[in-house]
Amino acid sequence: MKKADLILFSIHSVASNREKCDFERLLKECFALFPQIFGFSKYPQWPDSLKLDRQLRTLRKRKLITGSPKTSFSLTKLGKKIALETSKTFRQRKLFK
């Protein structure tokens, strides 16, 4: 699964809880859900914020999210569609395990 899709899923997860999705909250969510992907390779118990930075800029350019690290992030219609598709993929994987 692509890192960008996991970030969209994480933004959706935060928004679903009616929380503001600022950079720190998003980093926490990404690391809590996918620690092996968003942690430092040398110190896996710590989140690596650089793993979000470039991805967030790319997601904004692709018009999948709006916002910035100084404010907060939200999904566009297309971003939400991808987040929901990712969610379905996770549910399907659980069914087959």
Image (tube, rainbow, N blue to C red):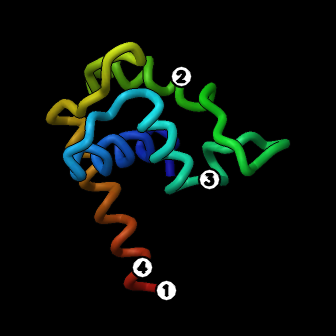
**Residue on which the image places disc 2:** 53
Q: CA distance from mark 1 to mark 3?
A: 21 Å
Q: CA distance from mark 3 to mark 4?
A: 18 Å
**Residue on which the image places disc 1:** 97
User: Where residue 35 is drawn, which disc sits there?
Assistant: 3
Mark toward the viewer: 4 or 2 = 2
Q: Position of residue 29 (x, y in %)?
A: 45, 47
Q: In the figure, 92 relative to 53: above or below? A: below
Q: Are marks 1 and 4 in contact (CB under 8 Å)?
A: yes
Category of crowding for the residue at label 4, using alpha-carbon neighbours closer than 10 angstroms: few (below 14), some (14–19), many (at least 20): few
Category of crowding for the residue at label 3, using alpha-carbon neighbours closer than 10 angstroms: few (below 14), some (14–19), many (at least 20): some
Q: Position of residue 18 (x, y in %)?
A: 19, 46
Amino acid on which disc 2 is placed: Asp
**Of the residues under marks 2 and 1, which one precedes in the sequence?**
2
Q: In the figure, 83 relative to 50: above or below? A: below
Amino acid on which disc 4 is placed: Lys
Q: Residue furthest left?
A: 77
Category of crowding for the residue at label 1, using alpha-carbon neighbours closer than 10 angstroms: few (below 14), some (14–19), many (at least 20): few
Amino acid on which disc 1 is placed: Lys
Q: CA distance from mark 3 to mark 2?
A: 16 Å
